[in-house]
Image (spheres, helix red, strand yellow):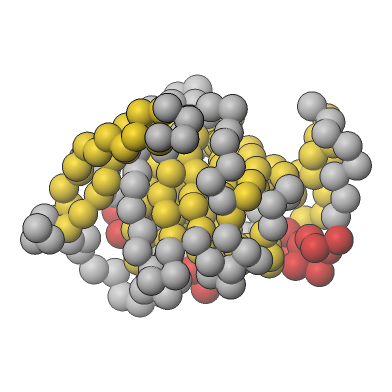
């Protein structure tokens, strides 16, 4: 797979809808633009549609100097977004969180010790906004975030945990460390920083009758929601 270096993210809004893949072996690469440490300054990519495939290269720190790198997207139609986060420092552990701007909350985190960190987001209606946020669990590191946009419910080559964004703003389904509630995660908000609600992780098995697959999902919910 060949990567093509593209424009910095400051110019991305104007050019994103016009970029050409140029074949399966050509993938555009964009660079994060600081400051992008909160929802109001996240780098905005405009509309996503099935067939989009690109990389975002950046650097994030394990301190308050650069605690987050936020990337904002709008779904043009119902779709699925697959991502892989490749980490440039073997001693660091970076995570990807899903932020919902409509409720000003980080609603799910893909927080394993894997490199690359992998996951996905299901968006059930066009016009919905969401943000993917890269943050450090341990260490400073460069990274490359690969984004692949597919039709909703399309089969992928490998099963990945997915969070869902519905028209009713219900987000769930995450592969996460049970103890992962970092200061950085709490701080990525438009409003004042507030403690996170107590969360529980529920293991759920779902059967895909069409393809004969058994899917294991991890759902986050508030401890007071029964």
Q: Is residue 79 visible?
A: yes
Q: Residue at x 12, y 61 (%)?
A: 225
| Left or right of 153, for residue 112 | left
Say which quarter of the image contains residue 154: top right
**Residue found at x 57% / y 60%:** 78
Judge whether residue 95 can be spotted in this image.
no
- Give percent across and percent down for residue 139: 43, 35
Residue 163, horizontal then vertical, whole percent: 41, 49
> Where does residue 114 sit, x and y in percent of width and height?
43, 26
Furthest toward the top, the residue is: 90
The quarter in which the C terminus is drawn is bottom left
Rendered view: 218 above or below 87: below
Dividing the picture into quadrants, the one containing residue 179 is top left
Residue 180: percent from left, percent from top = 27, 43
Which residue of the protein is positioned furthest toward the right in this rendering? 22
Q: Measuring 62% from the left and 50% from the top, which residue is drawn there? A: 151
- In the image, what residue occupies the spot 46% across and 35% down? 210
């Amino acid at each position: 797979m060949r990567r093509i270096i593209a424009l910095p993210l400051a110019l991305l809004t104007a050019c994103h809808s016009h970029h050409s893949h140029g074949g399966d072996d050509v993938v555009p690469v964009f660079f994060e633009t600081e400051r992008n440490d909160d929802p109001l300054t996240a780098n905005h990519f405009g509309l996503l549609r099935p067939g989009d495939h690109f990389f975002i290269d950046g650097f994030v720190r394990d301190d308050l100097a650069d605690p987050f790198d936020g990337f904002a997207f709008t779904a043009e139609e119902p779709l699925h977004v697959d991502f892989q986060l490749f980490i440039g420092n073997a001693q660091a552990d970076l995570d990807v969180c899903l932020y919902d701007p409509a409720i000003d909350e980080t609603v799910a985190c893909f927080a394993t010790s894997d490199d690359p960190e992998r996951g996905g987001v299901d968006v059930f209606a066009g016009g919905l906004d969401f943000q993917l946020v890269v943050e450090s669990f341990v260490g400073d590191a460069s990274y490359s975030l690969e984004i692949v946009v597919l039709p909703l419910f399309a089969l992928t080559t490998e099963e990945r945990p997915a969070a869902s964004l519905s028209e009713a703003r219900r987000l769930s389904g995450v592969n996460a460390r049970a103890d992962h509630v970092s200061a950085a995660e709490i701080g990525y908000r438009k409003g004042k920083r507030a403690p996170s609600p107590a969360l529980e992780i529920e293991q759920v098995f779902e059967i895909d009758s069409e393809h004969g697959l058994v899917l294991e999902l991890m759902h986050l919910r508030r401890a007071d929601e029964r």
